[in-house]
Amino acid sequence: MEWLGYLAAVLTTVAFVPQALKTIRSRDTRGLSLAMYAVFTAGIACWFGYGVALGSWPMILSNIVTFALAATILGLKLKHG
């Protein structure tokens, strides 16, 4: 059943990529909620830690990528408002 974890990890991470790329390219963060991205980024960090504790590579890999994207967007939101 580990394949299901990999599939879920790939789908949820890939779903986030277009929005992240659009925000990174445009630097337009006016429509994004600072509170949502702060909580989301913290949540992703927790999921990563949980994945490490379980030794779950699907959780570890997907949350590394998602955290990097979310943290970048959060940083842009803090910088550009």
Image (spheres, rainbow, N blue to C red):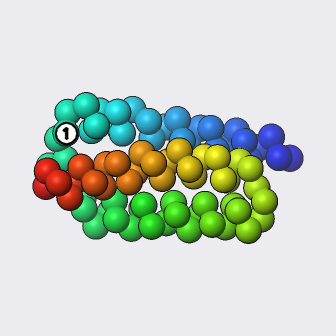
Question: Closer to the camera, 71 or 32?
Answer: 71
For the residue pair 38 and 52, the one nearer the viewer reads as 52
Instruction: Please tell me whether mark 1 sits on a helix, a strand or a loop.
Output: loop
Residue 32 shows in the view: no
Side of 44 relative to 21 (left or right): right
- Location of residue 5 in the rendering, given as x and y in whole percent from the top left corner: 74, 47
x and y, in percent, of residue 25 in the image: 25, 31
The furthest residue to the right:
1
Q: Amino acid at mark 1?
A: Arg
How many residues crowd around disc 1 within 10 Å: few (fewer than 14), some, or many (20 or more)? some
Q: Residue at x 51, y 60 (%)?
A: 44
- The residue depicted at 70 percent of the width and 62 percent of the height is 52
Left or right: where 68 falls relative to 80: right
Please provide percent x and percent y for residue 33: 24, 59
Residue at the (52%, 63%) spot, across then down: 45
What residue is shown with label 1?
27
